[in-house]
Amino acid sequence: MSKATTAPQPSRLNRLWHTWRFHLSILLLLIPLGFMPKYFADAALFRGDNGLGEREVGEIQVGPWSLRLAELRNEAPLLSGPAGYMKSFNAALCESCINQVKATYLRIGKPRSLRAAGVIFFGTPYRMGAQLPIPEKTKADAEIWITMEGWDGSMHQAAVPLGKASPATLAWLNKQGGKP
């Protein structure tokens, strides 16, 4: 006697997969399109098409020179490993002082000397960047100090209140329990 062999019936999951796999493939292609506007906005920001950053502080006079300062992102400082919390700032020197300024530094609190001037801006004079460390116990009335060193050895400083330079950082400090 011979037995007729019948093919096993496909499982319900197998039938569902064969029915909907085309639609799932299309969905997987469409999901990245939802992230494209943010990608293009970030690319324009880093190219400089949208200015120096998301929030420009404005023109700051530092002795005989000036620079435009901006937060790269209008958000709280980000934890950057053992270095602690960091905030990104961009700056651009004025046209007349590009050949006169040797270095530009950024720091929270008044620097004691040029050796403690803070983090140095890097990049071209038209778009420089710096990662400023933000201590968690920074006071709400703290100031960001800009130190500019000239090729002739001169040094000029200016201060900007933290609330003006980065309101998001000030709000973050208040939330962290920063001292008034």
Image: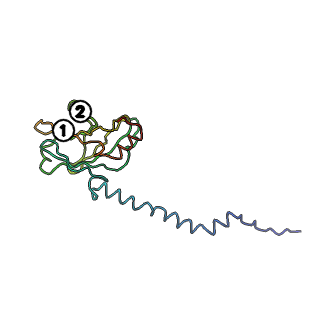
Q: Residue furthest left?
A: 152
Query: Where is residue 44 drawn, in percent x and y?
Result: 31, 58
- Image coloring type: rainbow
Q: Amino acid at mark 2?
A: Pro
Query: Where is residue 29 drawn, in percent x and y?
Result: 49, 64
Quadrant where the N terminus is found in the figure: bottom right
- Residue 63: name its quadrant: top left
Q: Is residue 178 left or right of residue 148?
A: right
Most foreground residue, 57 or 116: 57
Would you call the spot at circle 1 few (<14 residues within 10 Å), some (14-19), or many (20 or more)? some
Most foreground residue, 175 or 31: 175
Residue at x-position 13% and y-position 47%: 97
In the picture, the disc for residue 91 is none
Would you call the spot at circle 2 few (<14 residues within 10 Å), some (14-19), or many (20 or more)? some
From the viewer's perspective, is residue 51 above or below residue 83?
A: below
Q: Amino acid at mark 1?
A: Gln
Element type at marker 2? loop
Residue at x-position 29% and y-position 56%: 47
| Mark 1, residue position | 157
Q: Earlier in the sequence, mark 2 or mark 1?
A: 2
Q: Are marks 2 and 1 in contact (CB under 8 Å)?
A: yes
| Mark 2, residue position | 111
Query: Where is residue 106 drawn, in percent x and y?
Result: 25, 40
From the viewer's perspective, is residue 140 above or below residue 97?
A: above
